[in-house]
Amino acid sequence: MESKGWLKDRLAGITSLRRSFTAKCDGPNVSRADPAQLRKIFDKYASASEKSERFMTPKDFFQKFLGIHTESKYSERSLALLAGVVDQTKDG
């Protein structure tokens, strides 16, 4: 299937990109992101809410924010598996 190959290529690219960069917070060019800007971005993509707190669903995160699994016949199971890997603390 074409979509499996695309995902495999995308994940391979992310893995190789991760290997080529190392994050160090003690450098002069590294600064923390502005929390207000981060909240704006999060709110743009988060569609779920509970007790006035907003959340991103797996669809929000992968399809809207990352732009993957956007084809009409995506696998709900794949999204659930990816979400489980990303949300290691299981706190949403």
Image: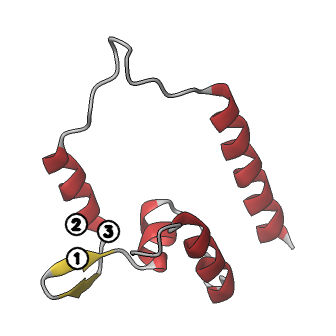
The tag on residue 72 is none
Rounded to the nearest angstrom, the CA distance separating label 2 from label 1 is: 7 Å
Residue 42: which quarter of the image?
bottom left
Of 76 and 19, nearer the camera is: 19
Picture coordinates of residue 75, whole percent (x, y): 68, 85
Identify the coloring: secondary structure
User: Would you name the residue on which mark 3 appears?
Assistant: 45
User: Would you name the residue on which mark 1 appears?
Assistant: 54
Picture coordinates of residue 59, whole percent (x, y): 47, 78
Q: Which residue is drawn at the image coordinates 26% and 33% (left, top)?
A: 32
- For residue 52, say whether it is visible: yes
Q: Amino acid at mark 2?
A: Asp
Residue 78: which quarter of the image?
bottom right
Element marked by disc 3: helix
Tags 2 and 1 touching, CB below 8 Å = yes
Element marked by disc 2: helix
Rounded to the nearest angstrom, the CA distance separating label 3 from label 2 is: 5 Å
Mark 2, other Cα within 10 Å: few <14 / some 14–19 / many ≥20:
some
Question: Between tags 1 and 3, which lies in front?
Answer: 1
Residue extending furthest front?
89
User: Would you name the residue on which mark 2 appears?
Assistant: 43
Picture coordinates of residue 86, whole percent (x, y): 54, 64
